[in-house]
Structures are given as C-alpha cells and as structure tokens.
Amino acid sequence: MFYFGVLAVIDAIMAVNYIALMSVSVYIDYFKSVFMYTIYLKYIRILMTESNCAICASLLMILLATTERVFRTFEGKQMEKCRRFLEKNRRAVSAFCVLFACCYKLCTFWEIAVVETGCEKPFEAISLEKGYLSQNEYYQLIWQFWFRNIFERFLPFFYLIITNILLVRAAKQESAKTIGNDPKARNPKVARRSVRDATRALISLVSMYLLSQTLQVILTTWETFFNHTLDDHIDTYSYMNDFVSIACLLSSCLRFPVYFVCNRQIHMAAVNTVKDLKKMCCRRRGSSPTQAFLELVFLSSKLCFGNS
C-alpha cells in the first residue's frame, strides 16, 4: 500500500505536467498567442525533465513493489532477510529510488535546446531543437538508444512478466494446498477468484507497460537509424510523439482502477475513504475551512499510506 501511495503522488505530478506541456500547446496553436508560446518555451525544458524523472520513479516503484511481493511469497533465508530489510527501510528505499530517478534523468534538461533562429515571424523566431548532448552521435546511440531501451523498457518488462508469472503460479499452488488439506477451510470459489484477480492484475500491468513503452521504442529506433526520413513523414512523427505522451498519462490513470479491482486492501480503503468523505461533506457546518482541509488531507493520506 505504501508504494501505491507514492505512485499516486507521482501520477498526480505527471497529470499536472501533462496539462502544462500538452494542453497549453493546443491552446497556443488555437489562439496563436505569442505570449503563451514564449512562456511555454521558458518552462518546457524543466517540465520535460521533471516528467521523465516522474516516469522513471514510477517504474522503480512498480519494480520495488513487485520485488517485495516476491520476497513475501517465496520462502528462504535470503528471501526472509531481504523482505525484512525492505519492510524496515521501505521509506528510505523509496526515497533513494526517487532520488536516483531524478539524478538519472537530469540529463534530459541538456538534451533539449531553445534556439533563436533570427526569423521575423514570432513563432519561427524561437524553436526547440536537440541539445548539445543529443547532437553527440555516441551519446545518442549508446545512451539514448541502447542503454535506455534495455534498462528502462526491455529488462523491466521481462522482469515484470517473469515475476508475475511466478507469483500467479505460487498463488495457484497455495490455493490447491489449502483446499487439499482442509476442503472446508476455504471456499474453492474464493481460491479461484484470488487466482483470477492475480492473473487479471498481471495482464493489466503488462498491457499498460506495453501501451506506454512500445511506441517509444519504435520512435527511438526511427530517430536513431532512419533520421533522414523524419522530414518526409513529419506529420506521422508528430502524431506518434503526441500519442506516446497520452499513452504514458493513460497508463498512470488506469493504474488505480486496475488495483482497485484486483487488490482487496486498496478496494476497501478506497470505499471507506469515500464513505468518510461523504460523512464529512454531509455533516453540519461548524468547522472552519482550515479544519475541513486538514481532515481532507488526513483522509487522503489514510487511503495512500494507511495500510503500509
């Protein structure tokens, strides 16, 4: 539950960044506002870096939650030691992962450059181009293409597939043992429902990860090996870039509904929090706005971190 709380905060940050990056650009195109365009260019490098840090941090949180679940499921001395270490230092490890993601993605700031072209037209006088890091062929090929695709997409994807398959198999074996030892101890329908929930979570998790990362791999391959064809298909390239951003946001938005359906703890915590919010909104007026705000923050923290 603690990791889901951290993920919720990261997803909220990504949602705000999406509005500032994607929605504002639509308004700029619609109203042809030079003022908005100038402000947009001033903060785009910062928010692009922040968005990449948030995406990397959310991936690390998913991997961390999956790893702790593996340690809880399988037996062994080393598994027990690792499980106790993570449970004891959960907040410190999460903070380290977020800090590592920020340091790892900080280079994004220098991969984008705002360049003055000298044109008389306002919208063509300043443009976004590759920064001095992205202009380096070795940096682009080794770091941006090979290293990032391997360590940010392929390895996490296969790790999640393998670990979730093992967890589903372990859940099936545990259900079979429980029913076999004492048929009255547990309803077979409950056991099958537990396995079905775990399987559904696996499929949803893998599908969301594929949704947000597969197209990015295709774009990176295109930019690296077929860069000379970008000008001939500039509209397709632009739409694909927009869809990548939407896919990342959609993956974040769907994360809570998936776990709400598949995880009973999150389901009960969310339902109880909504009930508490309903009681707070329907009761008599007598509390100050500050007190009501503090109660709302308390209920939100209860949902995110209450069962950690």
Image: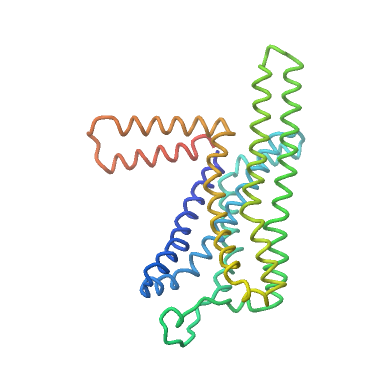
Q: Please report the residue visible at 45 percent of the width from the left and 87 percent of the height from the top.
A: 119
Task: Report the quarter where the C terminus lies.
Answer: top right
Between residues 8 and 295, which one lies in front from this camera angle?
Answer: 8
Q: Is residue 23 above or below residue 129?
A: above
Where residue 76 appears, x then y in whole percent?
77, 35
Q: Residue furthest top?
A: 184
The part of the image, by quadrant, that contains residue 258 is: top right
Between residues 13 and 292, which one lies in front from this camera angle?
Answer: 13
Q: Please report the residue visible at 57 percent of the width from the left and 64 percent of the height from the top.
A: 241
The colour scheme used to paint the residues is rainbow
Q: Is residue 8 above or below residue 129?
A: above
Task: Report the quarter where the N terminus lies.
Answer: top right
Q: Please report the residue visible at 37 percent of the width from the left and 72 percent of the height from the top.
A: 33
Q: Please report the residue visible at 44 percent of the width from the left and 30 percent of the height from the top.
A: 272
130 on left or right of 149: left
Q: Residue furthest left?
A: 286
Where residue 122 appears, x then y in whole percent?
41, 81
- Total numbered badges shown on the rendered structure: 0
170 on left or right of 270: right
Where residue 88 appears, x then y in whole percent?
60, 41
Where residue 228 appears, x then y in whole percent?
68, 77
